[in-house]
């Protein structure tokens, strides 16, 4: 997963490992990563702009891409910088 870190006037994405089982499918591993991102608390130096209460409704891995369906909360609140941050975290 990726978290956000503010350093002065800049915000950067910081990777954070998520433990998954070697036998997990891509779909199961991605769901676990997104669930952790959506439910974990921020730390003193890492944060998220994903609104509280955002839920993963569905995730599909197909030949044409990965499709993520998040609850309406994902689109609520914040300005353009906040939206750019949350989209970057999911991508």
Image (cartoon, rainbow, N blue to C red):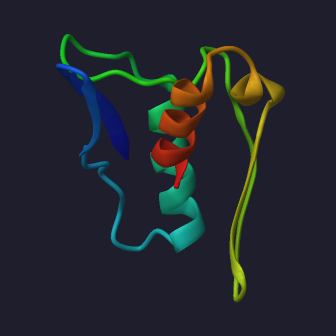
The tally of labels here is 0
* Residue furthest out toward the front: 9
* Residue furthest out toward the top: 44
* Residue furthest out toward the bottom: 63
Q: Is residue 7 above or below residue 3?
A: above
Residue 46, position as x, y percentages in the image: 26, 23
Residue 78, position as x, y percentages in the image: 62, 16
Residue at image x 69%, y 14%? 77
Q: Nearer the viewer, residue 27 or 1?
A: 1
Q: Nearer the viewer, residue 75 or 19?
A: 75
Residue 42, position as x, y percentages in the image: 34, 16
Residue at image x 48%, y 35%? 85
Res 76 → quadrant:
top right
Residue 60, position as x, y percentages in the image: 73, 66
Q: Is residue 21 above or below residue 48?
A: below
Q: Nearer the viewer, residue 11 or 59?
A: 11
Res 84 → quadrant:
top right
Question: On the picture, is 71 further left or further right than 28?
Answer: right
Question: On the picture, is 89 further left or further right than 20?
Answer: right
Residue at image x 70%, y 29%? 74
Question: On the picture, is 26 further left or further right than 17?
Answer: right
Residue at image x 37%, y 47%? 1
Q: Is residue 48 above or below residue 1?
A: above
């Amino acid at each position: 997963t990726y978290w956000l870190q503010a350093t002065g006037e800049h915000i950067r994405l910081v990777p954070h490992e998520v433990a998954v089982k070697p036998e997990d499918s891509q779909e199961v591993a991605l769901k676990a990563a997104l669930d952790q991102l959506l439910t974990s608390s921020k730390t003193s130096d890492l944060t998220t702009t994903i609104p509280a209460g955002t839920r993963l409704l569905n995730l599909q891995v197909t030949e044409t891409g990965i499709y993520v369906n998040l609850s309406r909360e994902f689109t609520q609140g914040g300005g353009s910088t906040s939206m750019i941050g949350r989209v970057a975290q999911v991508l």
